[in-house]
Amino acid sequence: MPEVQLLGKTEIWLHGIHLDNADLEEIARAAARTLSLPEDKVFTTDVREDHIVLDVLVPRVDFEAVAGKQPEILEALGKIPGVSIDENAEIHSEGVLGIIGTTRDQAASAVSEAKRMEEQIRKYASGRVAVVATGAELVEGNVKDTNFEAANEILGAAGFEVVFGGAVGDSEKEIAGLVSRLSGDGFGLIITTGGVGAEDKDRTLEALQILDPGLTTAVLAHYKIGQGRHVKDSVRIGVATLGWTTVISLPGPTHEVRLALPVIIEKIKEGTTPAKLVEAIAVPLRATLPHHH
């Protein structure tokens, strides 16, 4: 079945687990393997006398891959040196991941219910937009961000619920982390502003490529590497796909954001492909930038 959003509920609590000089990283890796998740996306975040807490750093999971996996996880953890499992050990989560602790029969019923909920959540999320501002100058408050106001005005008038997703510095990991969390919080559209230029501090597209290796981009202008502060040969915008969340990276200037937003509204409602979407957005933006070859 399609992957389902975790909607921010990413913790897994393992009760009845006791540790004696056990390798926490191996515990996380064993759980990740059992749940068919990347090993570098599951971490042990808390250890108590009779339970431990794992955190899953992905916004969505394959429901059938995690449903009813409690016995397999406990068995895998019990084979790790320094880990002992009580007879009544159990696993729970407050969100979708709670399906791990169900029986096989319960899991089958839950999968059917999840499919129904998936469609409801998808419909709900399709009307929600998060706007993310990138750049150290915005985080430090040196520059006023006017892009959210523009997005709220234009997208709000088109019927979207628009939320400020936060400001983040020029760090690939920070940008990727914030976008990933917002995707998990049920936003069908995330718009980032800034960080798409040719300077070394412009890292938004690199951040999105961490989340979506198939990131689709369009060139707005070409530059010669080494000219001024340019370390990249072009200014590009991009469209990433995270499950059913579309992430669009736009330039920072508000007049360019205002040019792009009507196109985004039109193409999103048409359900166009990422390649066609990013090219359509690029058309009005190219006229605003000098083209150096």
Image (cartoon, grey):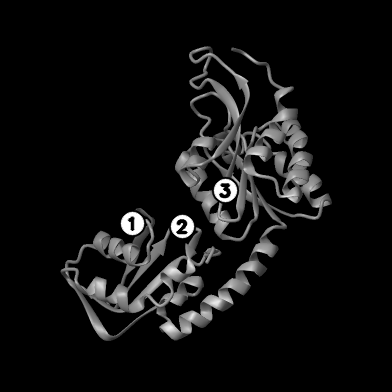
Question: Which residue appears farthest toward the right when viewing the image?
Answer: 157
In this rendering, which labeled residue sits more in front, label 3 or label 2? 3
Mark number displayed over residue 266: none
Instruction: Name the one closer to the observer, 142 or 170.
Output: 170
- Mark 2 Cα within 10 Å, few/some/many (few <14, many 20+)? many
Instruction: Let me know if residue 113 appears in the view.
Output: yes
Q: Residue at x 57, y 33 (%)?
A: 195
Three-letter code for the amino acid on which mark 3 is drawn: Thr
In this picture, residue 138 sits left or right of residue 10: right
Q: Secondary structure at mark 2?
A: loop
Q: Earlier in the sequence, mark 1 or mark 2?
A: 1
Mark number displayed over residue 39: 1
Please give the count of numbered marks on the rendered protein.
Answer: 3
In this picture, residue 240 sits left or right of residue 129: left
Three-letter code for the amino acid on which mark 2 is drawn: Val
Q: Secondary structure at mark 3?
A: strand
Q: Position of residue 149 (x, y in %)?
A: 75, 44
Q: CA distance from mark 3 to mark 2?
A: 14 Å
Instruction: Let me know if residue 149 appears in the view.
Output: no
CB-based contact (under 8 Å), mark 3 and mark 1: no
Look at mark 3 in the image and give the residue it sits on.
241
Instruction: Name the one closer to the observer, 185 or 277.
Output: 277
Mark number displayed over residue 58: 2
Q: Position of residue 11 (x, y in %)?
A: 43, 68
